[in-house]
Image: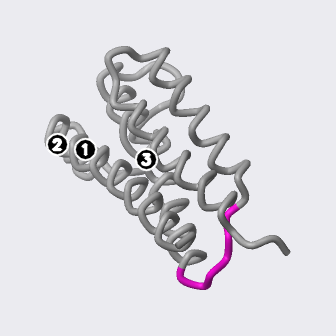
Amino acid sequence: MTSRLLRWASGIMIFIGAGHLVLLVLLSGDDVARWGAEGLWAAVPLLGGDLRNAVTFWGGPGSFSVPQILLGCLIWHLAGRGVTVPAGIGWAYAAWCVLGGVLLVPSPFFVGVVPGALIVLAARRAPAG
């Protein structure tokens, strides 16, 4: 039962992260294409440069979407091996999503509370030891 909860949590996390990157390409595809055309080295300078370019970077590959996908894949893998993810991971992830949702309203950040809660629930249902 706990592996099913973790699989659902990880699937939602992967979907959210991948969806974020797909939306980036759909909404700012020209900016991303320009990175490739101009060369990737220093495509987004730390100081100065085009603000739209920086927003595209921090809204896409510089955001938490890529680490979120990786975390989702790790949890999927651990669930397949029967390893329980600590409840603290779920609490921290849910808290981060609530904070992001409060700071950026309206926002789909609140959806992230669902996988966080599933991780906590799986940890509580796991056999002791």
Q: Is residue 62 left or right of residue 24?
A: right
Label 1, label 2: how far apart the Cα atoms are:
5 Å
Q: Residue under circle 1?
A: 32
Above or below 91: residue 12: below
Q: Residue at x 62, y 48 (%)?
A: 90
**Considering the numbered disc 1 on the image, is that residue within a helix, a strand or a loop?**
helix
- Horizontal and vertical percent for residue 66? 45, 53
Q: CA distance from mark 3 to mark 1?
A: 16 Å
Q: Which mark is residue 29?
A: 2
Q: Which mark is residue 65?
A: 3
Q: Secondary structure at mark 3?
A: helix
* Amino acid at pointer 3: Ser
Main SS, magenta residues: loop
Q: Which residue is at 37% across, 34% downward?
A: 59
**Earlier along the polypeptide chain: callout 2 or callout 3?**
2
What is the magenta range?
80-85
- Rounded to the nearest angstrom, the CA distance separating label 2 from label 3 is 17 Å
